[in-house]
Image (spheres, rainbow, N blue to C red):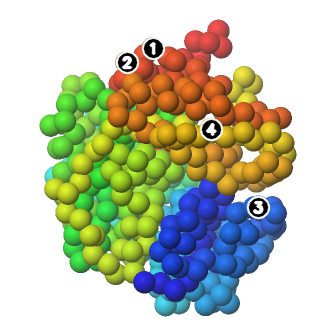
Amino acid sequence: MFKRVLIANRGEIALRIMRACQELGIETVCVYSTADKDAPYLKLADRAICIGPPAARESYLNIARIIAAAEVADVDAIHPGYGFLSERPDFSAACRDCKIEFIGPSPEAMQMLGDKVDCKKTAKAAGVPVFPGSESAIEDEEEAVRIASKIGYPVIIKASAGGGGRGMKVCHNEATLRMQLRVAGQEALAAFGNGAVFIEKFLEHARHVEIQMLGDKHGNAVYLFERDCSLQRRHQKVVEEAPAPNIDRKRLEKVCESAAKMIRNARYAGAATCEFLLDGRGDFYMLEVNTRVQVEHPVTEMVTGVDIVQMSIRIAAGEKIPFKQNDLQVRGHAIECRICAEDPAHNFRPSAGRIDTWQVPGGLGVRLDSHVVPGYVVPTNYDSMIAKLIVHADSREQALDRAARALREFNVGPIKTTIPLHQRLIENTDFRRGGVDIHYLERLLKASDR
Ligand code: ADP
């Protein structure tokens, strides 16, 4: 096992990784930008190293500074968490060049699965269904128009290196497609450092179901079943749950098997998530693979009992996955609410600043993953998520009631948070019935605006 690990991230996921390391007897080194210099979780690390100013490209996205910190602290491995450098093959390669273990896939496996265009090719080769659309990055406008008229509108333009729901454009006709293509390439280049875009069929009614995977360096791969992440705003997940409600288990098994095939074919080592959209007719399509731990990994941990972050570290250290597919089963139901420092009453405008009141829920089946303490100041520079509230209970109905109870206990001020939105969603009869589609939340918010 590693002696010392550097955590190349911040906030709740930095703390989550630190907890996993400490339970494995590993020393932790946390890096931080000056915007996070007073963050309370840094005191829990064995060592904290400042890597630069608030702007992410000069700190959390700066490979040279992070590698320098790793060398100064003499670590054996780096855990990238999610976001920032977690899906950058050049970072995984830089770690390898410096003889530091990257806790995640090799640059080759990351490229094969993490790049959306390459991933669709990998899926096709494994016989996994993908959306009809362009086979590779779009080279010219006429080609895009030809493909779109063949597959039929609406189509969606996506950045090959995209993530976080950004850089996607839905086009309902040729004129918008032509116009948006020009914008999309430039935006992708600015946001992800890679201007490649592609198009695919846009599904109007679908559910987002993703499969948690683990692969090791000895060729073993298992799936930890599915999560349903259909409640989204601006293509970003708001609530996640496991298992997925109201879907035939046989149908889900097929999706799980497809995900396993992709991971095995790529000889993938680490934690990964294969994302799919399921339509109303019983068909499913692979969306993308995330080659890292995901924000919503705790719901899977709660229903399977597997510590996914610890597993990612043990796999990187060369251990075999210590269980077989048949050893795994789902127990009960788990739901996660992403709590963000945003004001849902004012179009989700950011609400950064000092948190004076921070009264957190507890009790049986309640887990709170958060780096916040009373007096914490939410910086304006990064993602607005300040906590993840996860509940677990025997049935979905009990989990919903538990979530409602926990949300009532959760008192945060004076900044605004998305807690009231979650309270509303947990009470919503369509959501309680189970099986809302990916555009449900946007429709709900639009209807209440009127
Ligand atoms: P990102 O990497 O930015 O998260 P994804 O490809 O995972 O992007 O897509 C995020 C969300 O965008 C999906 O869960 C879904 O709601 C929506 N989406 C993506 N592709 C399509 C599609 N072809 N049809 C309908 N919705 C889509």
Check if mark 3's residue and mark 4's residue have beta carbons within 8 Å. no
Residue bearing mark 3: 39
| Nearer to us in this view, 411 or 231 | 411
The amino acid type found where label 3 is placed reads Ala
Q: Which mark is in front, 4 or 1?
A: 4
Q: CA distance from mark 3 to mark 4?
A: 21 Å
Q: Quadrant of ligand 1?
A: top left
First in residue order: circle 4 vs circle 1? 4
Separation of marks 4 and 2 at Cα, in angstroms? 25 Å
> Is label 1 in a helix, a strand or a loop?
helix
Q: Position of residue 356 (x, y in %)?
A: 84, 42
Q: Residues within 10 Å of mark 1 (few under 14, many from 20)?
A: few
Amino acid type shown at disc 4: Pro
- 92 or 220: nearer the viewer: 220
Residue 108, picture quadrant? bottom left
* Picture quadrant where residue 75 is located: bottom right
Residue depicted at x 61% and y 30%? 407
Q: CA distance from mark 4 to mark 1?
A: 24 Å
Residue annotated with mark 1: 429
Question: Mark 4: which secondary structure?
Answer: loop
Disc assigned to residue 57:
none
Q: Look at the numbered discs 1 and 2 and tell me whether their residues touch, using CB distance below 8 Å.
A: yes
Q: Residue at x 62, y 55 (%)?
A: 12
The residue drawn where x is 83% and y is 49% is: 375
Q: Amino acid at mark 1?
A: Thr
Sequence order check: which comes first, mark 3 or mark 4?
3
In the image, taking residue 325 as reference, residue 344 lies left or right, namely right
The residue labelled by disc 4 is 361
Q: CA distance from mark 3 to mark 2?
A: 40 Å
Mark 2, residue position: 433
Mark 3, mark 4: which one is toward the viewer?
4
